[in-house]
Image (cartoon, grey):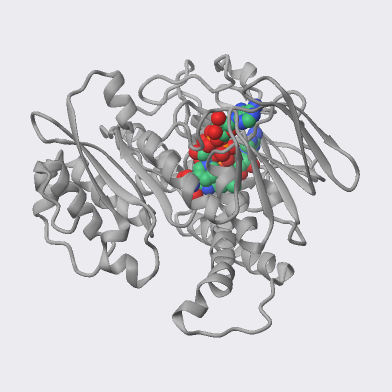
Amino acid sequence: MILNFSKKVMDYDVVVIGSGPGGYVGAIRCAQLGLKTALIEKYDTLGGTCLNVGCIPSKALLDSSEHFHNAKHNFDKHGIGVSSLKVDMKQMIARKNEVVEQTCGGVKFLMDKNKIDVHHGLGSFVDKNTIRITPAKGKPTTITTKNTIIATGSKPNYFPGMEPDKKRIITSTEALNLTAVPKKMIVIGGGVIGLELGSVYARLGTEIEVVEFADSIIPTMDRELGKELTKVLKKEGFKFNLQHKVQKVENKGKSVVVTALNKKDEEVSFEADYCLVAVGRKPYTEGLGLENAGVKVSERGQIETDNHLRTNVEGIYAIGDVVKGAMLAHKAEEEGVYVAEMLAGQKPHIDYNLIPGVVYTWPEVSAVGKTEEELKAAGVNYKKGSFPMRALGRARASMDIMGFVKVLADAETDEVLGVHMIAPRAADLIMEAVTAMEYRASAEDMARICHPHPTFTEATKEAALAATDDRAIHS
Ligand code: FAD
Ligand code: NAD
């Protein structure tokens, strides 16, 4: 154990501030390891961004809208007739809220099961071992702790001129609660949130106009993914304005107007019912009283940590969206477990190269490891094998023929270095690649594994065969 033992008797071994996937998972692991643990959450419900206004509600709406889209555009091809199809937005949101409520309730159950004390209120440092809890109503209390894990997450980011008013200029949080299907929505940012929530509304009939600063959508992922996803989403009715610099966004009462400079530096404007600002998220440290404990924050607002998620103050750790790295729920969870196990004297490990990324469009986009651009920049001699979904019997059976799987492997050793795909259920399919890479498999290893037929997974085998020595069977 490397617990921060002090002569003073403390209320807790560990206090976790923030109940998102980083915080609540970290708290459970601490409790499993026998540490007396408390969790502080400022809101009434547990689960953080992910469960309340992030991963879970967005996926619930993505599923609902996908059903509608299929019923409208694809059922007839299956020989299924549907008359008087309509969207009941109130019911769609109510179902989403029910999913959120059940999932957040599940976290409460897990806290009770693991005997973790939950305190509702804003957590702030009085000093490095004392935390004040200020509830929405009632008097503040204080608790003492040997160790603290800061897991306070992130909030939507925006730039000058595009400040959300939460009425017509909205963030993901408001976009998850619209009461009617808008006619038109401008989405600033062609990243994950913009394309996922844009998909929800495009499928329900909203005209989606994306205004993106970079020269591609999902610009940080492998470039071929951005190209293929552009084709997919254009079919769904998305319009893309790349290399556009947003100047200002104005709420005109019944509409919103976005003014931007295009790549020729000409001023262009777009008008719609709503403007969704989706240009990234920023770490959230407001009200934490970091200065009282002496915890350092970087220029980007992230809590500074070393490779073991330790802040500059002994006994204080930080994880998830509030520290550097991908802002992903599963990354936050891994970090929560890491700190808990380290506190218990274990030697945990996280391979940040193997944290998969997913975009929940349809088909889904997923990736793990290095992109082609990263391999080129690092001067790695690599080979590549691709397999198109349209060549797969399973994909034709479900009319999911767009997309591909691409396997990148070291040209000399054949070790798999990256896998990138656009495919139905790619979010689940990517796990084969993550597992293979965790065990440092070669492309040939992946290609030699028997894959069930007919499944979407066969595309991964075929792409691995193509990478091995250009011997895909079905293309
Ligand atoms: P958070 O989940 O942000 O939780 C932090 C918690 O701390 C909050 O509950 C907050 O209220 C609380 N808190 C903050 N300050 C204090 C304080 N001083 N005292 C007490 N409590 C405090 N990621 C994925 O991996 N997959 C997805 O599909 C996905 N979809 C997303 C969709 C949307 C629309 C959004 C916005 C995000 C999505 N994300 C997704 C990102 C994911 O939600 C975050 O990466 C994840 O929630 C980060 O977890 P965390 O524990 O670090 O922080
Ligand atoms: P993002 O970083 O994915 O995308 C932001 C996009 O906005 C980028 O394409 C960027 O080039 C663009 N942009 C930045 N400034 C701009 C400007 N001034 N004008 C126009 N475009 C601009 O961020 P996000 O979509 O807001 O998502 C935030 C975080 O939440 C991400 O880090 C993501 O990992 C996480 N998230 C994950 C999932 C998932 O895992 N499926 C889903 C939603 C959100």
Quadrant of the rendering where the N terminus is positioned: top left
Measuring from the top left, give residue 309's x and y in whole percent.
Answer: 41, 26
x 36%, y 32%: residue: 343
- 83 horizontally vs 378: left or right: right
Q: How many marks?
A: 0
- 304 horizontally vs 256: left or right: left
Measuring from the top left, give residue 456's x and y in whole percent.
Answer: 29, 62
**Ligand 1 image-quadrant field:** top right
Residue 256 can be seen in this image: yes
x 69%, y 71%: residue: 87
x 18%, y 29%: residue: 382
Residue 20 can be seen in this image: no
Q: Examine the image and state in which quarter residue 126 appears.
A: top right
Measuring from the top left, give residue 129's x and y in whole percent.
Answer: 55, 25
When the figure is inspected, residue 290 is found, relative to residue 389, above or below; the finding is above
The residue at the far right in this view is 253
Q: Examine the image and state in which quarter residue 127 appears.
A: top right
| Closest to the observer, 408 or 167 | 408
| Closest to the observer, 254 or 333 | 254
Measuring from the top left, give residue 214's x and y in whole percent.
Answer: 54, 28
| Closest to the observer, 223 or 91 | 223
- 119 horizontally vs 167: left or right: left
Quadrant of the rendering where the C terminus is positioned: bottom left
Q: Examine the image and state in which quarter residue 338 appears.
A: top left
